[in-house]
Amino acid sequence: MSVKVIMTWDIAAERDQEYFEFIIGEFVPGVQRLGLKPSEAWATLYGSYPQIQVGLLANDANHARQILASSDWGVLQDRLFGYVKNYSYKIVPVRAGFQF
């Protein structure tokens, strides 16, 4: 069964420009090389919710867990942590519509 890796975070203060350059230039290509398929990205404009939510698709939960446990993911995640705070993720079955 296909799953979605849902990640949320807030962009670190005064890191917006570097963050967006990293996301476009390294993070998205990196997750694709690892075998995850970006499905959506959301930004919160109002309210006390995480600023960013990203959805990545995987073939199944085992495949997602293998990728997230890999050293290549660790390197990519460590780079992401230089630009964000309040990071969290979960693996959920894919369903239609917005998932949080």
Image (cartoon, rainbow, N blue to C red):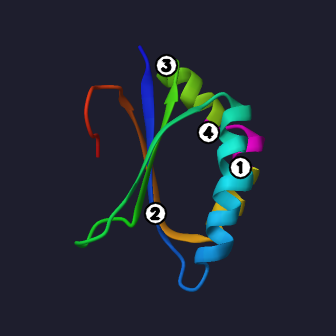
Badge 3 local density, few (<14 within 10 Å), some, or many (20+)? some
Determine whether the residue tagged by mark 4 lies in a helix, strand or loop.
helix
Mark 2 touches mark 1? (CB < 8 Å): no
Residue furthest to the bottom: 14
> Dot 3 corresponds to which residue?
60
**44 sits left or right of 19 in the view:** left
Give the residue at x 64% y 61%.
80
Q: CA distance from mark 4 to mark 2?
A: 17 Å
Determine whether the residue tagged by mark 1 lies in a helix, strand or loop.
helix
Q: Which amino acid, mark 3? A: Asp
Mark 4 touches mark 2? (CB < 8 Å): no
x%, y% of residue 90? Answer: 41, 43
Give the residue at x 48% y 24%.
61
> Dot 2 corresponds to which residue?
9
> Dot 1 corresponds to which residue?
74
**46 sits left or right of 2 in the view:** left
Image position of 44 with respect to 98: above or below: below
> Dot 4 corresponds to which residue?
68
Image position of 48 with respect to 91: above or below: below
x%, y% of residue 10? Answer: 45, 69
Image position of 45 with respect to 95: above or below: below
Q: Which amino acid, mark 1? A: Gly
Q: CA distance from mark 1 to mark 3?
A: 20 Å
Q: What are the residue bounds of the magenta stretch?
A: 68-74
Mark 4 touches mark 3? (CB < 8 Å): no
Work out which quarter of the rendered image holds the N terminus and state it.
Answer: top left
Task: Assess whether residue 69 is covered by the magenta stretch.
Answer: yes
